[in-house]
Image: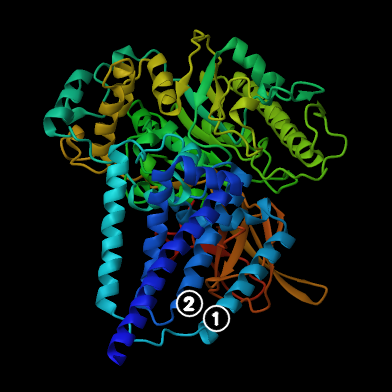
């Protein structure tokens, strides 16, 4: 009798536990979707009107919860997993508010990037409050770990494990059925819409398991051969232009990617005292222009430049994927830089922000760039209120790249001035651009007004740049466009073009090219420019130029993308013609000419004389980095009272946020007694570039 009672008791407990492991995931899913939709009512609507999607999302949550069936510390585990899911929901809501695009799995690869700009989006008080809240939760979780009751009866591990496995199988089956019936999708052309349609949990999970270009069902040697044959190219010479006599000109080609830049006059109800971007809008009337269909809103600059540089379609990659953080970190790929090298171009990248941002210093080697001038190699004197370098510094850097040699130059320039966040308090005194009407909320008005004045200054920079290029004495094409809309909360209904995924582009030139307006996808812009010059080098480039209007255009492009990045590289006869470049940091060589000892006010200093120093320069003595005073472009000073013969001096260009050494000079040795200043460069192997440090 006692045995029967025990079995009945355990049976009741077992059923009760199973119910708990069903009810908790449902509750968590409702909470997660409430954050995703900014409304508990909309969360319940999602459950009622999209039951298949809701169930699939809940099953994923349930699988993580059911791990607790096998644990003695069940209460602690359920609290922990609940906290993690709710934290993910909160993070999603914050990112939707800040940048419009939701939290996705690939964001976890951007933690290093996010850390460097955290203070631009959140005040120190908010950051401190967040850290304190997380710390409090950690303390609570620790107390729960110590105090929460353990399961007192013996757990039937294998039975519970079998249930866990069944849940996984059911989840996989449900996803496959829902996908086959059209309730779910595995490709998300619009990530924000997908999160609303399919649910946060499912979309986030897809970001983990679905990345890279999937192998097309018709991928084969025969398929790639047909594509290449239609291009009129030989696979043995796939990167070369078959008929270079068709090249009309070899002008300098400059791409200017303008951070968060778009014509805010398209906001339907907002009126300004004057046009914020009058010069850019005048250029749209004179030169080839149109809408550019971009991939993100409020963030994702590197994805826009990925599509521009490679002419590959991000729709074919995983949801929210950043190829800069995945495949391009260790693989070369055809790009406009490599294609233009076929015509004798020198290739440059310029960015008035950190070299390590989005791993550009690593990736640009695999995209064919000869030089990369980042903010560590610039003398920046003006910054926005939010701490971003103003774009006017880029004019001189572009001209330096053009004058570096006699070859035609391709320059990809990435601006940063328009970057968020946009302060909701009034920080500009007597701004030139003012919101006259259409915005009731004072905080939003301040943010829009701040943004409008930044793009107004960017517009003035464009004028200065085109004037300089007009007078530089060389034929030049300047392709200008916004990388994405700003994170100001615009919806499609707020804009006259009814799209938050369109910016504008203009192709300026100083030698009379015909005006040919056209709306294009981001990945079509570079082939359009090269086609206008008769340049057909490159498989991807020529494919766009010859197949844009074909029925198999996108499927053929996906085949090429898969083949080149993940397949057998059949398009190149199985051997990629692209080799990583020996990336030179900066145009101007930074060097040490002289080392001097100086005593001033009873303090011993060492003065380093040289060329092209800036505020990112740091003096290293015997491999130790010292706090460095920037005097001018030829003078640095450090406090140092132990100067001795054969002390090793190096000037390093250092990332201000991480302390990462972006590049450094060759080693110089100090010779002789304290009053001697002779220096010499050595060929010591330790002074040569490593994988993470480069010599100018």
Q: Is residue 687 above or below residue 371?
A: below
Q: Quadrant of the N terminus?
A: bottom left
Disc 1 to disc 2, C-alpha distance: 8 Å
Q: Secondary structure at mark 2?
A: helix
696 left or right, relative to 615: left
Tell me where residue 675 sits by quadrant: bottom right
Quarter-of-image position of residue 486: top right
Q: Position of residue 314 (x, y in %)?
A: 39, 36
293 sits to left or right of 390: left
Tell me residue 104's x, y (percent).
47, 50
Looking at the rendered structure, which numbered label has been put on residue 392? none
Badge 1 vs badge 2, beta-carbon distance below 8 Å: yes
Residue 144's tag is 1
Whether residue 354 is visible here, answered yes or no, is no
Q: Secondary structure at mark 1?
A: helix
* Side of 24 relative to 246 (left or right): right
Furthest toward the right, the residue is 430
Q: Nearer the viewer, residue 80 or 541?
A: 80
Q: Please tell me whether mark 1 or mark 2 is closer to you in this view.
A: 2
Please give the residue where the numbered disc 2 appears in the rendered image.
75
Please indicate, yes or no, whether residue 512 appears anywhere in the rendered image.
yes
């Amino acid at each position: 009798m006692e045995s029967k009672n025990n079995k009945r008791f355990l049976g009741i407990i077992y059923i009760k536990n199973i119910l708990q492991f069903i009810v908790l995931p449902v509750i968590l899913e409702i909470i997660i979707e409430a954050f995703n939709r900014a409304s508990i009512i909309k969360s319940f609507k999602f459950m009622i009107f999209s039951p298949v999607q809701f169930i699939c999302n809940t099953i994923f949550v349930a699988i993580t919860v059911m791990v607790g069936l096998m644990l003695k510390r069940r209460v602690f585990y359920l609290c922990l997993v609940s906290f993690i899911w709710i934290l993910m929901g909160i993070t999603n809501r914050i990112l939707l508010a800040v940048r419009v695009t939701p939290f996705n799995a690939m964001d976890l690869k951007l933690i290093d990037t996010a850390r460097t700009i955290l203070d631009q989006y959140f005040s120190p008080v908010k950051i401190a409050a967040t850290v304190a809240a997380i710390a409090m939760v950690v303390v609570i979780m620790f107390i729960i770990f110590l105090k929460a009751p353990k399961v007192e009866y013996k757990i039937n591990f294998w039975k519970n494990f079998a249930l866990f496995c069944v849940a996984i199988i059911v989840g996989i089956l449900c996803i496959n059925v829902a996908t086959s019936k059209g309730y779910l999708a595995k490709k998300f052309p619009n990530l924000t819409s997908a999160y609303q349609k399919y649910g946060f949990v499912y979309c986030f999970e897809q970001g983990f398991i679905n990345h890279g270009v999937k192998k097309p069902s018709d991928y084969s040697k025969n398929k790639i051969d047909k594509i290449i044959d239609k291009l009129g190219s030989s696979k043995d010479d796939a990167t070369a232009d078959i008929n270079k006599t068709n090249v009309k000109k070899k002008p300098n080609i400059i791409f200017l990617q303008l951070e968060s830049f778009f014509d805010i006059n398209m906001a339907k109800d907002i009126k300004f005292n004057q046009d914020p971007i009058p010069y850019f809008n005048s250029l749209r009337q004179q030169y080839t222009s149109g809408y550019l269909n971009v991939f993100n809103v409020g963030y994702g600059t590197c994805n826009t430049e990925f599509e521009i540089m490679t002419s590959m379609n991000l729709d074919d990659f995983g949801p929210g994927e950043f190829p800069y953080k995945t495949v391009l970190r260790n693989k070369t790929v055809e790009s406009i830089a490599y294609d233009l090298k076929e015509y004798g171009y020198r290739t440059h990248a310029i960015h008035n922000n950190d070299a390590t941002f989005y791993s550009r210093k690593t990736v640009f080697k695999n995209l064919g760039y000869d030089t990369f001038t980042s903010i560590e190699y610039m003398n920046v004197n003006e910054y926005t209120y939010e701490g971003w370098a103003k774009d006017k510094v880029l004019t001189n850097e572009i001209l330096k790249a053009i004058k570096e040699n006699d070859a035609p130059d391709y320059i990809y320039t990435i601006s940063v001035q328009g970057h968020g966040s946009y302060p909701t308090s009034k920080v500009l005194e007597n701004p030139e651009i003012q919101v006259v009407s259409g915005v009731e909320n004072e905080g939003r008005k301040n943010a829009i007004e701040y943004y409008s004045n930044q793009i107004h200054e960017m517009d003035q920079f464009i004028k200065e740049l085109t004037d300089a290029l007009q007078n530089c004495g060389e034929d030049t094409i300047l392709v200008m466009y916004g990388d994405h809309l700003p994170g100001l909360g615009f919806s499609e209904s707020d804009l006259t073009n009814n799209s938050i995924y369109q910016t504008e582009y203009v192709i300026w030139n100083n030698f009379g090219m015909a005006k040919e307006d056209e709306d294009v996808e981001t990945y079509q812009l570079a082939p359009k420019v090269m086609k206008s010059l008769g340049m057909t080098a490159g498989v991807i480039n020529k494919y766009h130029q010859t197949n844009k209007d074909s029925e198999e255009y996108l499927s053929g492009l996906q085949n090429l993308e898969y083949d080149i990045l993940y397949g057998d590289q059949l398009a190149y006869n199985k051997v990629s013609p692209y080799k990583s470049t020996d990336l030179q940091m900066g145009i101007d060589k930074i060097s040490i000419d002289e080392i001097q000892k100086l005593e001033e006010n009873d303090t011993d200093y060492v003065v380093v004389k040289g060329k092209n120093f800036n505020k990112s320069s740091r003096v290293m003595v015997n491999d130790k980095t010292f706090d460095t005073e920037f005097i001018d472009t030829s003078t640095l000073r450090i406090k140092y009272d132990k100067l001795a013969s054969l002390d090793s001096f190096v000037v390093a260009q250092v990332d201000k946020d991480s302390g990462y050494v972006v590049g450094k000079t060759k080693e110089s040795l100090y010779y002789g007694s304290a009053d001697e200043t002779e220096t010499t460069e050595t060929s010591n192997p330790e002074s040569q570039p490593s994988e993470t440090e480069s010599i100018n």
